[in-house]
Amino acid sequence: MKAFTKIILGVIYFLGIFYLVLPNPVYPDLSFSSRSDEPGDTWQHLDQKAFYTQTERSDVLSELENAFALRQFSLVAPSFRLNYRPEETTFFVREQVDSSYLEEIVHPLRESLFVSGWEPQNSPRWQDLPYEERPRIEKYNQEFHAKITLRLSSSSVWARILIWSLIFPASYFVFMSINKTLAKNE
């Protein structure tokens, strides 16, 4: 039984290493959008970019999740999305960014893409105003539905492998501690 457990753990370990060394996904652009050239959206923050778009939130997130997917040998590694309060945009993206929503597309133990969307028409701040009086996003002589700010957060391959490798002995010690505690209580 111990040999079988070691084989299973070895397979899980090497599958994890394979997952961690896959090439990074492309830092996506938003299609059918205009790239922002405002201060803070260009060379000041190289890990960030922003777009003006007519696209709705669900379509933006679906497109970015698909574009940011990890693909290898026609397989797609799973990712998941985390939803944050818009107030946390100052911590995760940058200060002084208006936001109606903030979501994170995560590849566990690898990289994340933060998506901050500003939709002034749907913002709770102005829901009491008549629709015609709510603020609008006007840039490049055009009115846009939303401004989407993206921020990429990634790690080095060596840091990923180190953390993954440390998970196994840490899990072993936790498991042994739980076993000792349960044995004492019996």
Image (cartoon, rainbow, N blue to C red):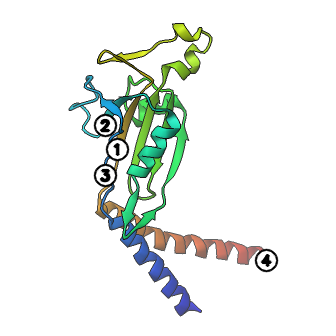
Foreground: disc 3 or disc 4: 3
Q: Quadrant of residue 114?
A: top left
| Amino acid type, label 3 | Val
Residue matched to label 3 = 26
Residue matched to label 1 = 152
Cα–Cα gap, marks 1 and 3 = 10 Å
Tag 1's secondary structure?
strand
Q: Are marks 3 and 4 in contact (CB under 8 Å)?
A: no
User: Which comes sooner in the sequence, label 4 or label 2?
Assistant: 2
| Amino acid type, label 1 | Leu
Residue matched to label 4 = 186
Q: Are marks 2 and 1 in contact (CB under 8 Å)?
A: yes
Q: Are marks 1 and 3 in contact (CB under 8 Å)?
A: no
| Amino acid type, label 4 | Glu
| Amino acid type, label 2 | Gln
Cα–Cα gap, marks 4 and 2 = 55 Å
Cα–Cα gap, marks 4 and 1 = 50 Å
User: Which comes sooner in the sequence, label 2 or label 1?
Assistant: 2
